[in-house]
């Protein structure tokens, strides 16, 4: 039986071909991100019938997004992201938890993030109310119905938090950081880990903000706010080494915004919200159809969120580790032959 063309090639050419795809840290980051996106697209296609349930077609601000549609769509999206991440973890011989979920203080960070998200969204909404840019129309739910729908929407937004954080700041943030860090070390740049991490943070935050442009009712200020809060989430990863604070914040911010205060979230309203409200005045202050995130008042609140991360999350991971989410001991075994 004849050898394959690759096997017949001279040894130095086989080595050169191998080095195109595999470097000192394993599968090269650029190829790894492309392969992750390929897996993600394939899995999304398989789950497309379920993911379409989250499309807000024929959903008006008056009727709102039903919880069942959001839960189905976000669960399918999360399944696709987890599936793509798991496939890459097997290929790279890592644990799936290495991509932002390993954290001995994960529960504490999650709770801190949730409290921060709910409190800061409340500060933003109440500031709009005091400025006359948001009017509360009264409660819509009472008693058991209020409790039941509160729990349902909390679960829905927990899925949102997991899905979006793992999509933008899980495998992608991890792998781009690894690639840029490797290039910095090859040219002997100091602070290679910091340069790699924050280069990835800027790229993923831009994608996060840009991605919100597909939401109905989104505004330029809303897009900027989304990109800036994404940088805050990246800062929490830099401080803790994990996604847990960001997941908690993301969940609680969206829950308080959509359910508790009944305001728009990137232009989307939900069904069965606790309070009814409506914006008044110019969209620059009120946020208009976008919701509070479309108001200029959201920007100083995001600055407070940045300070909250600095003050409440002491560094728990060294910037000198070879992987942004993993200890040296676990990173040393995560290589592709």
Image (cartoon, rainbow, N blue to C red):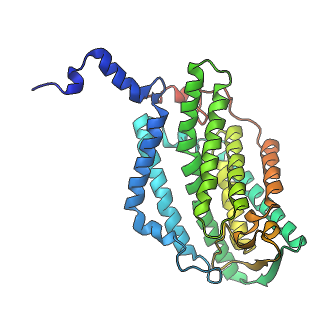
- Of all residues, the one furthest to the left in this rendering is 1
Q: Does 188 appear above or below 47?
A: above
Residue at 56% in and 45% down: 170
Q: Quadrant of residue 87?
A: top left
Percent x, y of residue 38:
41, 48
Q: Quadrant of residue 184?
A: top right
Q: In terms of depth relative to the viewer, which is nearer, 107 or 123?
A: 123
- Say whether residue 269 is visible: yes
Q: Does 38 appear above or below 280?
A: above
Q: Quadrant of the C terminus?
A: top left
Q: Quadrant of the N terminus?
A: top left
Residue at 64% in and 67% down: 154
Percent x, y of residue 110:
68, 52
Residue at 77% in and 45% down: 309
Left or right side of 323 for 11: left
Percent x, y of residue 242:
63, 43
- Say whether residue 107 is visible: no
Q: In terms of depth relative to the viewer, which is nearer, 208 or 312?
A: 208
Percent x, y of residue 334:
47, 30
């Amino acid at each position: 039986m004849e050898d394959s063309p690759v096997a017949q090639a001279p040894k130095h050419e086989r080595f050169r071909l191998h080095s195109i795809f595999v470097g000192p840290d394993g599968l090269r980051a650029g190829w790894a991100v492309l392969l992750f996106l390929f897996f993600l697209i394939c899995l999304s296609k398989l789950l497309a019938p379920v993911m379409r349930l989250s499309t807000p077609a024929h959903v008006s601000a008056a009727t709102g997004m039903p919880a069942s549609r959001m839960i189905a769509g976000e669960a399918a999206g999360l399944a696709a992201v987890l599936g793509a991440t798991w496939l890459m973890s097997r290929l790279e011989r890592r644990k799936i938890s290495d991509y932002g979920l390993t954290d001995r203080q994960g529960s504490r960070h999650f709770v801190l993030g949730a409290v921060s998200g709910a409190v800061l969204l409340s500060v933003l909404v109440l500031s709009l109310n005091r400025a006359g840019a948001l009017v509360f129309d009264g409660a819509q739910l009472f008693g058991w119905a209020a409790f039941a729908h509160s729990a349902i929407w909390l679960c829905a937004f927990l899925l949102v938090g997991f899905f979006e954080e793992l999509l933008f700041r899980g495998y992608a943030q991890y792998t781009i950081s690894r690639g840029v860090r490797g290039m910095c070390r090859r040219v002997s740049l100091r602070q290679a880990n910091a340069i790699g991490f924050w280069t990835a943070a800027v790229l993923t935050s831009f994608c996060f903000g840009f991605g919100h442009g597909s939401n109905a009712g989104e505004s330029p200020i809303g897009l900027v706010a989304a990109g800036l809060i994404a940088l805050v989430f990246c800062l929490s990863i830099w401080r803790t080494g994990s996604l847990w604070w960001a997941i908690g914040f993301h969940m609680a911010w969206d829950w308080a915004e959509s359910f508790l205060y009944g305001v728009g979230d990137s232009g989307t309203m939900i069904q069965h919200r606790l309070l009814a409200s409506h914006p008044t005045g110019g969209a620059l202050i009120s946020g208009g159809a976008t919701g509070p995130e479309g108001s200029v008042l959201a920007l100083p609140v995001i600055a407070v969120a940045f300070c909250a991360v600095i003050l409440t999350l002491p560094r728990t991971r060294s910037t000198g580790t070879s992987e942004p989410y993993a200890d040296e001991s676990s990173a040393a075994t995560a290589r592709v032959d």
